[in-house]
């Protein structure tokens, strides 16, 4: 049953490698994943791949991300000698592998520069629309992106369900809806599927749980351990 699920390597193979690094993304592809997921924020008007507002959890730096210059951020160790990558570097890796990437708009004011970068990638033939999915908890940011790039798939992310869920689905016309797995039941999957959207669940690190979600109608999962879903069953 899990073989029917679309598997996204959450921040790369982040269960075994430093999250959101080129190493983690390479390892995700090497274990068999065809899709990676990452977070992007702006530092000195450059799109970097980084999740937190602060540096301590994932680097040897201290303080807030937005207090650093790009050069200072790039000098930090993001684990195992890895740099904090630029979004463009990860997109090149995706292009080389002919894989797919889910870009989460993590930071404010990311919709416009991400749209510009992806438009450039599409024009140059580096990536195709089928390789791209853009998501966010920041629904206004996601809506701005959708208005700029309506030809690309987008997805709202929810940790708690809003009362006006269907209103947002009409406004965004998302390809998928990304839900905390704890929210998911058969009724919710049916409700979202009725709006012509897929349900993807995060963050699922257990094959039995993935199978239960698939039986409810979930079409994809985000996992820190993509390798366990590509082992011989």
Image (tube, rainbow, N blue to C red):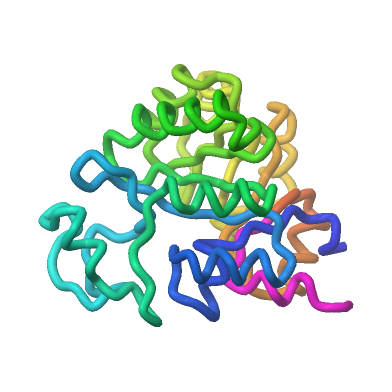
Q: Nearer the viewer, residue 96 or 182?
A: 96
Query: Percent position (x, y) of residue 24?
Result: 52, 69
Figure check: 126 above or below 222 = above
Report x, y in % for residue 28.
62, 67
Residue visible at 41% across and 48% down? 87
> The N terminus appears in which quarter of the rendering?
bottom right
Residue 55: x and y in percent read: 23, 68
Magenta segment? 221-233
62 relative to 191 in the view: left or right:
left
Residue 15 is covered by the magenta coloring: no
Q: Quadrant of the C terminus?
A: bottom right
Q: Is residue 65 above or below residue 40?
A: below
Magenta stretch: includes residue 225: yes
Percent x, y of residue 88: 43, 46
Q: Is residue 57 visible?
A: no
Residue at the image point whose x is 28% and y is 43% from the top = 46
Q: Residue at x 58, y 66 (%)?
A: 26
Q: How many marks?
A: 0
């Amino acid at each position: 049953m899990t073989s029917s699920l679309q598997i996204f390597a959450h921040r790369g193979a982040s269960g075994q490698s430093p999250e959101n690094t080129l190493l983690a993304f390479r390892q995700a592809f090497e274990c068999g994943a065809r899709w990676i997921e990452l977070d992007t924020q702006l530092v000195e008007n450059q799109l970097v791949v980084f999740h937190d507002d602060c540096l301590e959890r994932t680097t040897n730096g201290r303080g807030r991300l937005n207090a650093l210059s790009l050069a200072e951020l790039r000098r930090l160790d993001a684990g195992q000698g890895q740099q904090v990558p630029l979004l463009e570097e990860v997109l090149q890796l995706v292009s080389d592998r002919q894989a797919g990437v889910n870009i989460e708009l993590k930071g404010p004011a990311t919709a416009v520069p991400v749209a510009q970068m992806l438009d450039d990638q599409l024009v140059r033939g580096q990536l195709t629309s089928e390789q791209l999915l853009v998501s966010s908890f920041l629904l206004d940011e996601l809506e701005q992106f959708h208005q700029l790039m309506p030809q690309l798939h987008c997805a709202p992310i929810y940790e708690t369900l809003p009362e006006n869920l269907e209103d947002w689905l009409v406004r965004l016309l998302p390809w998928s809806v990304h839900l905390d797995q704890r929210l998911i039941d058969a009724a919710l999957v049916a409700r979202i599927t009725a709006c012509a959207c897929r349900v993807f669940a995060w963050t699922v690190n257990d094959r039995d749980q993935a199978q239960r979600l698939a039986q409810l109608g979930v079409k994809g999962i985000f996992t820190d351990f993509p390798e366990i879903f590509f082992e011989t069953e």
